[in-house]
């Protein structure tokens, strides 16, 4: 792409407002706290965030009370779409997922999550057949608890999944990436660089984080536009490439030395985007 084309793309993108997916998708019952605080403040390293995906309100409530009592940060989603949008805008450390959801089957939610999300997924389901269990584990779930269940057992499985995940982080997953002079810390959700005055930090929106995580987790690989749109905005947004152009232009303005001639956040015309380290 020439600089003129890039500039044109930026202007086209900027003219079109693109919604931030996380906010619209957070249901009122998810509580006032965690989603907003995660957006406005740097995340505390000690806080472990759990996403509950469950359409039974009573069960969600019981899980939330039990998890919060153990100092977990809790987000809840009632549908598969909400789960995908929330996981992208507020990346969880672990996910507890029901299979029978009102919109998308939980197994499909796992498939979509696993394209970019490595957080352990514990399925919590009334389906007890070996086929259901094998199906969920095969597409990327880490554990399977059948309903009815004992809360103590679920919490123990969750701790075990988080421990396994911790021991694996850093082995196969770079949690920091360089974009030009910026260091992007995907764990702490911080972007910083050395400057004359010491250290300079940069603020990204939840949408920008969602896109950036997808790209940075696959250095050098093409990530399709439809995949990014589905992961960040949710199913049904595959055609909204204007949203993506808008936010990619903003990311480049923030992170690239010369946004008109990006060297790290590259467009593959008609296909998608690539992070070039
Ligand atoms: Ca259900």
Image: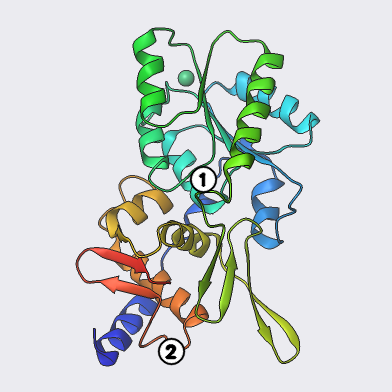
Image height of 152 relative to 160, above or below: above
Image height of 65 relative to 9, above or below: above
Q: Residues within 10 Å of mark 2 (few under 14, many from 20)?
A: few
Q: Name the side, left or right, on which 182 lies relative to 268.
A: right
Image height of 251 relative to 123, above or below: below
Residue 227 visible from this viewpoint: yes
Q: Picture coordinates of residue 4 (x, y %)?
A: 27, 92
Q: Name the side, left or right, on which 140 lies relative to 145.
A: left
Residue denoted by label 1 = 87
Q: Picture coordinates of residue 277 (x, y %)?
A: 43, 72
Q: Picture coordinates of residue 141 (x, y %)?
A: 46, 29
Q: Secondary structure at mark 2?
A: loop
Q: Picture coordinates of residue 223 (x, y %)?
A: 32, 58
> Mark on residue 258?
2
Residue 16 visible from this viewpoint: no
Q: Residue at x 37, y 40 (%)?
A: 112
Image height of 215 relative to 73, above or below: below
The answer to which of 265 and 5 lies nearer the viewer is 265
Count of labels shown? 2
- Colour style of the rendered protein structure: rainbow
Q: Residue furthest front?
A: 171
């Amino acid at each position: 792409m020439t600089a003129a084309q890039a500039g044109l793309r930026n202007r086209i993108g900027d003219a079109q407002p693109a919604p931030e997916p996380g906010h619209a998708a957070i249901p009122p019952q998810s509580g006032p706290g965690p989603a907003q605080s995660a957006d406005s403040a740097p995340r505390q390293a000690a806080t472990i965030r759990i996403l509950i995906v469950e359409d039974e309100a009573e069960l969600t409530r019981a899980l939330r009370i039990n998890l919060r009592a153990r100092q977990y940060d809790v987000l809840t989603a009632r549908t598969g779409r909400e789960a995908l949008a929330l996981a992208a805008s507020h990346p969880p450390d672990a996910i507890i997922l029901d299979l029978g959801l009102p919109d998308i089957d939980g197994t499909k939610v796992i498939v979509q999550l696993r394209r970019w999300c490595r957080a352990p997924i514990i399925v919590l389901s009334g389906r007890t057949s070996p086929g259901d269990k094998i199906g969920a584990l095969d597409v990327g779930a880490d554990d399977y608890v059948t309903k009815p269940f004992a809360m103590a057992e679920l919490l123990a499985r969750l701790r075990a999944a988080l421990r396994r995940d911790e021991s694996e982080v850093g082995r196969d997953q770079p949690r920091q990436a360089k974009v030009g002079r910026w260091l992007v810390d995907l764990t702490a959700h911080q972007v910083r660089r050395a400057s004359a005055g010491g250290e300079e930090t940069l603020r990204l929106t939840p949408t920008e984080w969602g896109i950036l995580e997808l790209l940075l987790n696959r250095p050098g690989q093409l990530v399709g536009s439809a995949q990014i749109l589905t992961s960040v905005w949710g199913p049904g947004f595959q055609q909204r490439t204007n949203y993506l152009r808008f936010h990619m232009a903003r990311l480049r303005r923030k992170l690239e030395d010369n946004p008109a001639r990006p060297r790290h956040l590259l467009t593959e015309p008609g296909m998608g985007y690539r992070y070039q380290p």
